[in-house]
Amino acid sequence: MRHDLRVFPPLGTQPLRRRLLALGATAIAACALGLAAPQAHAADKIIIMVGGINKLIYLPPKLAESLGYFKEEGLDVELQSQPAGVDAENELLAGAVQAVVGYYDHSIDLQSKGKEVTSITQLLLVPGGMEMVRADLAGTVRSMADLKGKTLGVTGLGSSSSFLAQYLASRAGLKAGDYSILPVGAGNTLIAAMKQKRVDVAWTTEPTTSILLASGAAKVLVDMSSVEGTKAALGGLYPASSLYVHRSWMMSHKAEAQKLARAFVKTLKYIQTHSAEDVAEKMPKDYYGGNKAIYVQALKASLPMYSPDGKMPAGGPEQVLKVMAGFNPNIKGKNIDLAKTYTNEFVDAVK
């Protein structure tokens, strides 16, 4: 709202005392009318940016909202969405949001750049996605080693999917110059990129994975939707989706951080104790992509990837650091303090 002060006579025509009194009265009146209220309200609201809110890897925040768990904690939470985790991260750094649901590895990458964010609840034990190859190339591209001269699709440059794709390629003996990377987002934009043959292999998650498989447009190249598949591909667990915040915000908002952790732990417990059909019923109908059966099927296959308790798995941070240090120039030669990239303090306090 605009507050026009031109109702006052020009300043030069009033004695100084009258001018100060008039301006002071205006400020008091503005407060009485609640004109300062939006700022106070904004300070109370917690905006959580999600790196693709309709992806199953980021299901917990919307489910928590649908179940009323944020309100039960007395929190005023607004969920917003960005197509890639790296974009959500930028919103956090800009101060536009208070928290992000994105991959834990961003906490490590940001610390290497002098920015401290901390994961306060771990939502996924594994990346929860797959590298998928176009169906017409499935006969010749049987592993990541066959990607020389090919184009890899990722959600965004600097995104977790780009970290993982480069690491998988390096484990297969390829160098960065052997292939190209193209950001294609997720969901419909990724599907379009595959069908238009702008990418040869792409990282994607449910329900997009099931949609591509059902349509025959792509086949699975590397499966990291399960603990077993992730260990086979990466050599260990790779804790992925998490709720992370600025470390300074966490230290100055302990009560809010605890309430957020409690809401998410309750949500994870709900996932563990309910069927895929039950969970799907709590989600917005437009998340089904016009096919509820495929959505439920994808959700059923995804249930094992969710953390049962929100805790960081033992050895997980070390494995993520190992993956990233293999190719990420920001991390090479840096001393990363993993203890500052995550904490179990808040989930441990949940009864």
Image (cartoon, helix red, strand yellow):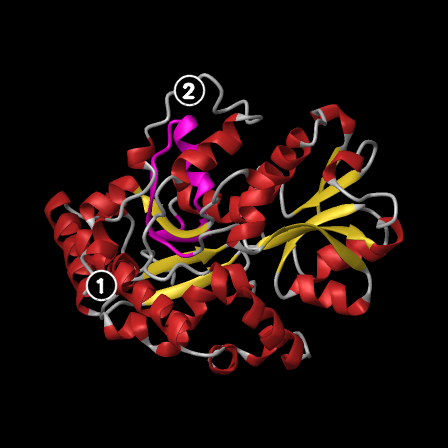
Q: Are marks 2 and 1 in contact (CB under 8 Å)?
A: no
**Residue 100 painted magenta:** yes
Q: In the image, residue 254 lies at what x, y percent?
A: 18, 51
Please provide percent x and percent y for residue 72.
25, 75
Magenta segment: 96-123
Name the residue nearer the viewer: 25 or 208. Answer: 208
Q: Is residue 271 above or below residue 173?
A: below
Q: Nearer the viewer, residue 44 or 266?
A: 266
Q: Is residue 162 magenta?
A: no
Position in image of residue 157 (x %, y %): 62, 38
> Crowding at label 2, few (<14), some or many (≥20) Cα neighbours within 10 Å?
few
Which residue is at 28% across, 41% downward? 247
In the picture, the disc for residue 30 is 1
Q: Is residue 228 above or below residue 272?
A: above
User: Residue at image x 39%, y 65%?
Assistant: 78
What residue type is disc 1 on?
A: Ala
Q: Amino acid at mark 2?
A: Lys
Q: Is residue 159 above or below residue 32?
A: above
Give the residue at x 55% y 72%.
300
Cα–Cα span, label 2 and label 1: 51 Å
Mark positioned earlier in the residue sequence (2 or 1): 1
Query: Is residue 185 visible to us here?
Result: no
Q: Quadrant of residue 309?
A: bottom left
Is 337 above or below relative to 203?
A: above
Residue hosting label 2: 334
- The N terminus - image quarter: bottom left
Callout 2: SS: loop
Of residues 92 and 130, which is closer to you in this image? 130
